[in-house]
């Protein structure tokens, strides 16, 4: 069993250290084994005779009353050891972790100010399931049955290639009993076939005919791949400029250079993987290996092993694919590198873009960061000359960038209970009349973000959390998006018992859809959110249906905003551009600018010009001005200057410290003690403790500190020193979040 990791460090060790029961023989060796649990260090075990362990081997180690998987970090002679050690149980049947992966795990743990065991748990995730079983297939033996019925004849006719019993029964239109009967009389036999694995990619197949700026970019990347050394390239190209085509050429070059080279393509969202997988499959004649939460356990195990054995040449995956045990990593691509989904916010807390750069350094290979709206951190590094900066300023082919216009809602206010202004409504009508598609963007699931009682003024909240309940009309429920708590929409106010007093406040995608249907009764309208597309398959089906023109209008949250090409989409309407600016956190402006640029970039592909209408109450805000002018650099200048003045990333360092407990009194007492124990370090300031904005989640109270430090400060060392000075009691959970993206 591989236990889950968690970056929750309480004063008590989650497991007792291995208890000695037998002495190591003086001649025997000692293995330092790292266990995938939040333990402070590796434990020593005796090597059983005949095991001949090596560093990286995955072993079974006794821990307390059970056995857990662990990894050998070091072997040494046991001669000097004079305390008894427990012997290891044995070696796991799995390929060992390569040295680069071991080094990466330890680097990542230090970066996250977490334990190496928590990082190791990320790397061993694929081992949690058994390998897929060998498949049982049936083939004809050539021996004819004594009695041939019409059903049996159909089976024998259909039994060409080896196939599963179910497939053969379906092909012949018979019941499984008929198949069984033919096996019994020896006319069919069972064979075992190994689970299906993707064919190897063929990097010699021709790629797209690149346009001159793509070709120039690809040439630089191929040169970096040839150097086989650490480097970072920022592939900075407007939406539709063909960044994927460019980095696919770099991948092809990496595979051509070495028959064992491996390439990792990281994507922020599962919904994007389908399209990219298809493009890789077309480019290389075989689908790449996929790695994300939608891949079933046994298939994950197969992929994990294929990566560890060097058989998986191209992996396309979500952030956790970074922790796979690559043998010979030759290139990492982080597509949509600015995307917040690269930040893992729970368990082992890390940012996959930052860790990808670290991994590339450890593996001595190039990393390509691709985006139309690079993060300010990456832009800054490119401007400072630390990254190779490749710019693609035009869309591929005839397609131009869309016209972006602001709609001043002060001038064109939507009617009461309405959200679409007159200019946007008119544009939607014209687009429909031309037979083209529109996308309305609003980053809010459900019908209304808030339900209020008109009688007593209370807002409906989840019983055990500090968050408002979101009204969902499809499911007729009120749902807490934080915890998943849900209840039917009540008839009476739960606070004052008034009837007919509850009103829905504000719009969600379902409500915008309702309004769009009233405006365009003949249009075929669909909502895309995590409610209508809860998994990768349904999301990809919706995207495919939109791409092939089955809908005229899509009302979507951000999952549909990125990376999809809808050829007939010519109008994008941003329903509430101000919504993201209200977060008030460090990256609110940056995130809004990136998201709205990406969304607007969906409009107009191929030969059709596109148009983006952005509804805002604050058209003078610098973000809105930069969007309208499509002036990314002006926005970056402004924002970087503000960050510099405030000493915020990328000019300074931040870390969040979160204390959580079910016991408010103990939390308060410990928070004060912890504050008093903060180390005094030059160039570092501690703010807090303060109640977290989401101070109560599922009955757990949370308090936060924020550490702001100058770039030169080793903020991880600062955090570790802090924790060492005031270890939390078992009732309190302490979490460090280095370079936080969420301030809730
Ligand atoms: P980006 O990732 O920069 O938004 P894509 O790589 O998705 O851009 O390219 C946008 C569209 O243009 C895709 O449909 C892609 O197939 C097409 N495209 C880009 N470059 C070429 C090329 N050189 N030849 C043919 N089609 C291309």
Image (cartoon, rainbow, N blue to C red):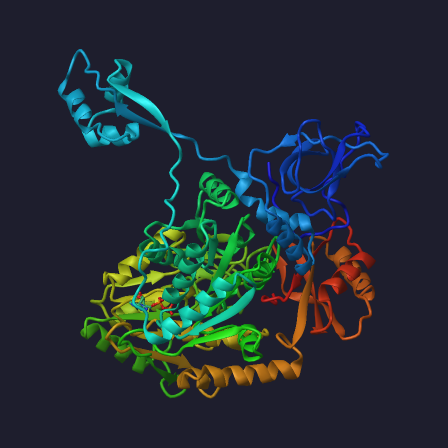
Where does the C terminus fall, quadrant-wise? Answer: bottom right
The structure residue drawn at horizontal position 31% and vertical position 59%, both measured from the top left corner, is: 206
Q: Which quarter of the rendered image does ligand 1 occupy? A: bottom left
Question: Residue pushed farthest top?
Answer: 146
Q: Tell me: 422 left or right of 639.
A: left
Q: Tell me: 691 left or right of 517.
A: right
Q: Depth check: 387 or 589 in front?
A: 387
Q: Is residue 415 visible?
A: no
Q: Depth check: 658 or 397 in front?
A: 397
Whole-percent x, y for residue 148 in the image: 15, 16
The structure residue drawn at horizontal position 47% and vertical position 49%, both measured from the top left corner, is: 260
The structure residue drawn at horizontal position 38% and vertical position 44%, both measured from the top left corner, is: 198
Q: Tell me: 28 left or right of 628.
A: right
The structure residue drawn at horizontal position 27% and vertical position 58%, both measured from the top left corner, is: 545
Whole-percent x, y for residue 143 in the image: 21, 16
520, above or below 728, in the image:
below
Where does the N terminus fall, quadrant-wise? Answer: top right
104, above or below 409, in the image:
above
Question: Residue pushed farthest right?
Answer: 82
Q: Is residue 187 visible?
A: yes
153, above or below 541, in the image:
above
Whole-percent x, y for residue 697 in the image: 61, 57
Snapshot quadrant of residue 191? top left
Q: Depth check: 128 or 203 in front?
A: 203
Whole-percent x, y for residue 286 in the image: 34, 49
């Amino acid at each position: 069993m591989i236990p889950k990791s968690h970056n929750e460090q309480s004063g008590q060790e989650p497991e007792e250290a291995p208890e000695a029961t037998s002495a190591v023989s003086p001649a025997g060796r000692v293995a330092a084994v790292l266990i995938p649990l939040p333990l402070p260090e590796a434990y020593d075990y005796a090597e059983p005779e005949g095991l001949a362990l090596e560093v990286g081997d995955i072993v079974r180690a006794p821990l307390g009353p059970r056995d857990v998987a662990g990894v050998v970090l070091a072997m040494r002679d046991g001669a000097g050891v004079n305390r008894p050690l427990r012997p290891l149980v044995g070696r796991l049947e799995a390929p060992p972790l390569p040295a680069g992966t071991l080094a990466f795990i330890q680097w990542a743990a230090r970066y996250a100010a977490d334990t190496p065991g928590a990082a190791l748990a990320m790397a061993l995730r694929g081992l949690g399931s058994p390998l897929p079983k060998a498949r049982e297939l049936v083939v004809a033996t050539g021996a004819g049955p004594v009695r041939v019925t019409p059903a049996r004849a159909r089976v024998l006719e259909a039994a060409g290639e080896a196939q599963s019993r179910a497939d053969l029964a379906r092909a012949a239109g018979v019941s499984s009993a008929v198949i069984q009967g033919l096996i019994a009389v020896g006319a069919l036999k069972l064979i075992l076939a190994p689970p299906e694995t993707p064919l190897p990619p063929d990097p010699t197949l021709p790629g797209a005919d690149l346009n001159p700026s793509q070709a120039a970019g690809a040439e630089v990347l191929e040169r970096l791949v040839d150097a086989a050394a650490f480097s970072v390239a920022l592939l900075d190209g407007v939406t539709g400029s063909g960044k994927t085509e460019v980095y696919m050429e770099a991948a092809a070059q990496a595979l051509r250079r070495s028959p064992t080279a491996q390439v990792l393509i990281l994507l922020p969202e599962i919904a994007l993987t389908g399209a990219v997988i298809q493009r890789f499959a077309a480019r290389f004649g075989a689908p790449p290996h996929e790695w994300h939460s939608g891949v079933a356990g046994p298939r994950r195990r197969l992929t994990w092993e294929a990566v560890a054995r060097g058989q998986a040449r191209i992996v396309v995956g979500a952030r956790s694919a970074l922790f796979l045990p690559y043998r010979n990593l030759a290139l990492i691509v982080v597509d949509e590198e600015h995307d917040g989904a690269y930040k893992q916010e729970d368990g082992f807390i890390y940012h996959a873009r930052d860790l990808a750069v670290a991994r590339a350094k450890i593996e001595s290979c190039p990393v390509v960061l691709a985006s139309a709206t690079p993060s300010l951190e990456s832009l800054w590094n490119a401007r400072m000359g630390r990254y190779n900066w490749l710019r693609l300023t035009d869309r591929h082919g005839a397609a131009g960038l869309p016209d972006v216009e602001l709609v001043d809602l002060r001038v064109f206010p939507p009617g009461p209970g309405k959200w679409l202004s007159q200019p946007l409504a008119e544009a939607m009508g014209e687009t429909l009349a031309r037979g083209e598609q529109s996308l309305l963007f609003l980053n809010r699931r459900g019908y209304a973000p808030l339900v209020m009682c008109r009688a007593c003024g209370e807002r409906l909240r989840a019983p055990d959390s500090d968050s408002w309940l979101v009204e969902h009309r499809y499911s007729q429920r009120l749902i807490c998006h934080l915890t998943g708590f849900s209840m039917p929409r009540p008839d009476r106010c739960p606070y004052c018992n008034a009837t007919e007093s509850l009103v829905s406040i504000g719009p969600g995608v379902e409500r915008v859809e309702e309004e769009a249907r009233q405006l365009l009764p003949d249009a075929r309208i669909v909502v895309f959110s995590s409610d209508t597309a809860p998994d990768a398959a349904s999301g990809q089906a919706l995207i495919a249906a939109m791409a092939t023109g089955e809908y005229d209008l899509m009302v979507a949250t951000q999952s549909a905003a990125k990376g999809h090409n809808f050829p007939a989409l010519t109008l994008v309407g941003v329903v509430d551009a101000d919504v993201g600016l209200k977060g008030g956190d460090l990256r609110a402006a940056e995130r809004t600018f990136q998201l709205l640029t990406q969304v607007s970039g969906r409009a107009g592909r191929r030969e059709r010009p596109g148009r983006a209408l952005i509804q805002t109450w604050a058209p003078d805000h610098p973000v809105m001005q930069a969007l309208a002018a499509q002036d990314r650099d002006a926005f970056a200048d402004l924002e970087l200057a503000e960050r510099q003045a405030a000493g915020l990333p990328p000019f300074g360092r931040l870390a969040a410290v979160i204390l959580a407990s079910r016991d408010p009194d103990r939390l308060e007492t410990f928070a004060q003690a912890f504050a008093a124990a903060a180390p005094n370090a030059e160039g570092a300031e501690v703010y807090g403790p303060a109640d977290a904005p989401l101070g109560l989640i599922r009955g757990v109270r949370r308090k936060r500190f924020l550490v702001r430090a100058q770039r030169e400060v080793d903020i991880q060392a600062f955090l570790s020193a802090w924790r060492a000075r005031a270890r939390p009691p078992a009732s309190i959970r302490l979490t460090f979040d280095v370079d936080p993206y969420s301030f809730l």
